[in-house]
Image: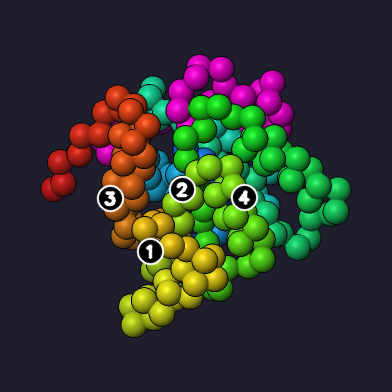
Amino acid sequence: MKIKSSEFIISAVKQSQYPTDGLPEIALAGRSNVGKSSLINMLVNRKKLARTSSAPGKTQTINFYKINNEFHLVDLPGYGFAKVSKKNKEEWGRIIEEYLTSRENLIEVLQLVDIRHKPTQQDKQMYNWIKYFGYKGIVVATKLDKLKRSQRQKNINTIRKELEMNQDDILVPISSMNREGKEVLWEAICKVFIEKGLNITIEEAAEI
Ligand code: GTP
Ligand code: MG
């Protein structure tokens, strides 16, 4: 994917604040600290477009980013952060549910899980939710650089099994640190655009 432009549009906590330009959206869901914001930055070759933090719970709103003036990447608030209050957890549920159930231009959801760990109960719930709402649910296994090469297949198998993924469900291992997996994920996203009949420019940037 050739990135010509990427810009932050808005932070939203309710429907009335979502962008109204009608562009198709790809959202990123996952546990707090799994690497959603880092992945957005890596995908669009920017260091600080999406705010990242080593302290979990950084992104607590839905953040919309416009890419190439053609589509949005949507950073959803992370779940599973133990230190947030019950009230905040309920608020998180409301924000996500409202978005997933109402957003007509949402075409796909990327479910991020940490490649080092077994998916949590909430990861499973989220994945089931995504499927329930009719999305493929592309699973992105993050922080690949932190795992020994010899452990990769074993951990991928565990994630597939725990999430009860089918053979044709997609799992992309990725590192936002060293960019491994980037082109594979863009290809999976571009495939979604094509399947939806969207005319989105997907020419490759020349690799040097
Ligand atoms: P919330 O906003 O709290 O939901 O978190 P998030 O999912 O957006 O995570 P974020 O991108 O802020 O990353 C959390 C931490 O993980 C940061 O310290 C990142 O530098 C680190 N991180 C993210 N992706 C990777 C990766 O691929 N490899 C390594 N080594 N670290 C990563
Ligand atoms: Mg974040």
Q: Distance between the residues labelled 3 and 4?
A: 27 Å
Residue 129: image tag? 4
Q: How far apart are marks 4 and 2 (CA)?
A: 11 Å
Q: Which element carries disc 4, helix, strand or loop?
A: helix
Percent coordinates x, y for residue 178 in the rendering: 34, 60
Q: Which of marks 3 and 4 is in front?
A: 4
Query: Circle 1 is placed at which residue position?
Result: 167
Q: Which element carries disc 2, helix, strand or loop?
A: loop
Is residue 71 visible in the rendered image? The answer is yes
Task: Please report whichever mark, 1 or 4, sits nearer to the chain's N-terminal start.
Answer: 4
Q: Does the magenta stretch include residue 199?
A: no
Residue 136: image tag? 2
Percent coordinates x, y for residue 195 in the rendering: 33, 36
Percent coordinates x, y for residue 149 in the rendering: 33, 78
Residue nearest the observer in this picture, 5 or 193? 193
The quarter of the displayed image where residue 45 is located? top left
What span is colored magenta in the figure? 1-25
In the image, residue 151 sits, relative to residue 159, either above or below, namely: below
Query: Circle 3 is placed at which residue position?
Result: 183
Q: How far apart are marks 2 and 3 (CA)?
A: 19 Å
